[in-house]
Image (tube, rainbow, N blue to C red):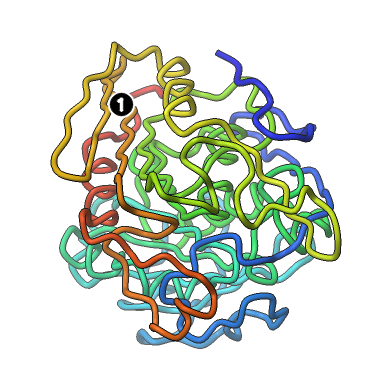
């Protein structure tokens, strides 16, 4: 089931399944779009590079990738958090990889790719959203990639230097997953992607243009551009009804400037319930059921082959990662950031959804 255009511009990318698609380069820039909870000292709009490659908070940094077709060499990835580089399109890209001591590498393990919001970094996402603790408890691996100049190219008019320079972030993440699979025994049926805001935009773009993920966890985000022929995939979307950056009711948010000026931002997605309904159509789901517990409303649909589409709405929440690390008060005031909701732990909720929805056999 094709999606219609969800933004004010067109995008030339189409679903390529296992091929690595090319993301169109369009004028956009990094502004305070998204995901600034607990930025850890990041200054929005800075062009400094992410943490230098080769540093590590684990036992050491990664060595060369294993030759194609070789068995994964887990010695290349220390237990704990480590920094790595990979070259994609003649550009050195960086990411952090968390290998918990609880992960049993005697069998394939799940992989979660966590995409930070604009003005964030992989290290900031690692510190802010609780994924390392969840990985310790449940024995999976987490990758925290860095966007170019703290943003991701996810569609027309968004976002920042990556879109302006024609960075292919879909290819970057695809090759990143391949690279990690040469280092650790990753289970392709339990490989997942999650992201907040600009990172969530890229997560949806990956769902539109590839079929490498079993499920998507999208937080405070939407879908921009066309999604003409997506493969079926389980989707969990978490959104605050008071979000003014990526409005729950759709349309441009408070950071949107129509794609003009030095820092163009053009994001004009559909109402969040409509987006969930479109994915239910892609997955050929049954009629959804809705339950409400205080400020949290869940609309859940079961779908063929064990897939599901779920929308979690938090009535009094804004643009934030529920259950994430609180913002420094001064930053919250100066940057007009929404505090993380305490009504839900988004990380635990997303992981439980991922755990329950691996890719079906042959899918």
**Pointer 1 residue:** 308
Q: Quadrant of residue 142?
A: bottom left
Residue at 30% across / 26% down in the picture? 308
**Residue 305 quadrant:** top left
Q: Residue at x 57, y 84 (%)?
A: 51
The quarter of the displayed image where residue 358 is located: top left
**Residue 250 image position (x, y, % from top left):** 55, 36
Number of marks in the rendered image: 1
Query: Which percent across, then down, holds residue 303?
Result: 31, 17
Residue beneath the point at 38% across and 37% down: 215
Quarter containing the C terminus: top left
**Residue 37 in the image, given as x and y percentages of width and height:** 42, 70
Indicate the quadrant containing the N terminus: top left, top right, bottom left or bottom right.
Answer: top right
For residue 219, above or below residue 139: above
> Within 10 Å of the Cα at label 1, are there few (<14), some (14-19), or many (20+) other Cα atoms?
many
Whether residue 277 is situated above or below residue 144 in the rendered picture: above
């Amino acid at each position: 089931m094709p999606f219609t255009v969800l933004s004010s511009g067109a995008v030339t990318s189409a679903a390529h399944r296992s091929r690595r698609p090319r993301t169109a380069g369009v004028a956009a820039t990094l502004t305070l779009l998204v995901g600034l909870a607990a930025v850890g000292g990041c200054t929005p709009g800075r062009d400094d590079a992410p943490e230098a490659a080769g540093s590590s908070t684990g036992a050491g940094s990664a060595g060369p990738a294993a030759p194609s077709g070789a068995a994964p060499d887990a010695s290349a990835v220390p237990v704990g958090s480590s920094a790595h580089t990979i070259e994609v399109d003649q550009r050195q890209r960086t990411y952090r990889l968390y290998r918990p001591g609880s992960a049993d590498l005697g069998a394939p393990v799940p992989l979660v790719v966590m995409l930070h919001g604009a003005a964030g970094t992989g290290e900031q996402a690692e510190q802010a959203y609780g994924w390392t603790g969840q990985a310790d408890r449940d024995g999976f691996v987490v990758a925290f990639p860095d966007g170019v100049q703290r943003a991701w190219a996810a569609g027309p008019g968004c976002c920042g230097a990556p879109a302006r320079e024609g960075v292919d972030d879909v290819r970057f993440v695809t090759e990143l997953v391949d690279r990690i699979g040469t280092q650790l025994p990753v289970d392709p049926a339990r490989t997942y992607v999650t992201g907040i805001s600009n990172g969530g935009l890229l997560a949806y773009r990956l769902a539109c243009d590839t079929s490498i993920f079993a499920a998507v966890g999208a937080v405070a985000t939407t879908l921009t551009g066309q999604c003409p022929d997506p493969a079926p995939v389980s989707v969990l979307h978490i959104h605050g009804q008071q979000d003014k950056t990526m409005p729950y009711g759709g349309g441009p948010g408070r950071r949107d400037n129509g794609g003009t000026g030095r820092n163009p931002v053009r994001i004009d997605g559909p109402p969040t319930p409509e987006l969930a309904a479109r994915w239910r159509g892609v997955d050929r789901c049954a009629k959804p059921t809705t339950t409400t517990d205080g400020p949290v409303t869940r609309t859940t649909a079961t779908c063929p082959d064990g897939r599901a589409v779920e929308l979690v709405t938090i009535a009094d929440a804004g643009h934030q990662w529920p259950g994430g690390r609180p913002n420094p008060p001064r930053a919250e005031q100066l940057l007009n950031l929404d505090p993380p909701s305490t009504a839900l732990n988004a990380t635990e909720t997303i992981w439980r959804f991922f755990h329950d929805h691996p890719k079906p056999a042959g899918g």
